[in-house]
Image (cartoon, rainbow, N blue to C red):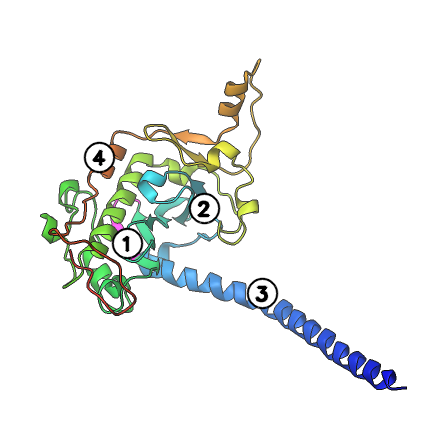
Amino acid sequence: MKKKPILIAAFILGSFAVGGVGLVAMTNELTQERIIENQREAMLSKLRAIVPAERMTNDPLTDKILVHDEAMLGAPTSEVMRVRDGDEPVAVVLQPVVPDGYAGPIRLLVAVLSDGTLGGVRVLSHHETPGLGDQIDERKDDWIVEQFNGRSLRDPLPEQWLVKRDGGVFDQFTGATITPRSVVHAVKSTLLYVQQQGERLYDLPALGAPTVADSPSETLTTATAADLDPPPAGTTAPIVPAPGPAATPATPEPEAANAAATSVAVGNTGTDAAAASDSPTPQTDGATLTPTTAGSGEEDD
């Protein structure tokens, strides 16, 4: 007889558990679309701040392609959004990664207008030291706006794309040089990449798929296994276009078949090596730099 109250209590507890899980699932289902829409509006808001919003007549979040050039863009796969005014190209917006930030990788949003000038640069994510390197965030300081808006490879010339401490024209932070140095180099590399690729960045068909972070399996459906690996130095950097009819090679050899399956290749010029050689080595004045916890150290070199 004592087992009956225990069974009743277990049944009641189980019912509450099932009901709670169901309620959470239903709430998630009802709010998922709103979350996605909020994320979409947040990205569009960032885009409108760095491109001429009145000329953005397309949807850049679907008018995009994937490119592969880790040497210049800091990641094996990078997304390129296109902004258009009707059929007229307005800007390409890239998301390069700065791999050598003081406290970790820095993700940027870089808009390059069709004439090669910068529409603007914004930081998407970083781990830089509060009060020092975090001044790259436009919410903390105007540095990233003042340093890059309207700049190009003509103003200043490529050899001057350095912080002032290294003989260039860009300001560094008081007590923090590594972070702005790395950001300046990444923005320069992005400009060089766009200059190399030219109109192809606008002409290739759009993927029109979710972002890489949201759904890599869908976004990379047109890429082969070879495409997903970063290309070796000195080789071509493939761009993944939208799916299209594939040509059938005659008498394919194993290596030739793999080459035919890869995405459209865009050749890298010697500028890659120049961009890589431009990357300044942090000067430590004989001291060893050790990253500190947030808000507890200097990063100047």
Q: CA distance from mark 1 to mark 4?
A: 20 Å
How far apart marks 2 and 4 lie (CA) works out to: 28 Å
Precedes in sequence: disc 4 or disc 3: 3
Residue under label 1, please give it.
Answer: 101
Q: Is residue 116 magenta?
A: yes
Q: Earlier in the sequence, mark 2 or mark 3?
A: 3
Q: Quick one: SS at disc 3?
A: helix
Residue in the picture at 21% in, 43% down = 279
Numbered tag placed on residue 274 in the rendering: 4
Note whether 143 is above or below 234 in the view shown. Answer: below
* Residue 64 as seen in the image, left or right of residue 133: right
Query: Can you tell which of label 2 and label 4 is closer to the viewer?
Result: 4
- Check disc 2 and report the residue beneath it: 64
Residue 188 position by quadrant: top left
Q: Which residue is mark 3?
A: 33
- Give percent across and percent down for residue 46: 37, 61
Q: For the magenta stretch, what is the residue range?
A: 114-121
Mark 2: give few (<14), some (14-19) or many (20+) Cα within 10 Å. Answer: many
Return the x and y of residue 231 as percentages of the image width and height: 39, 33
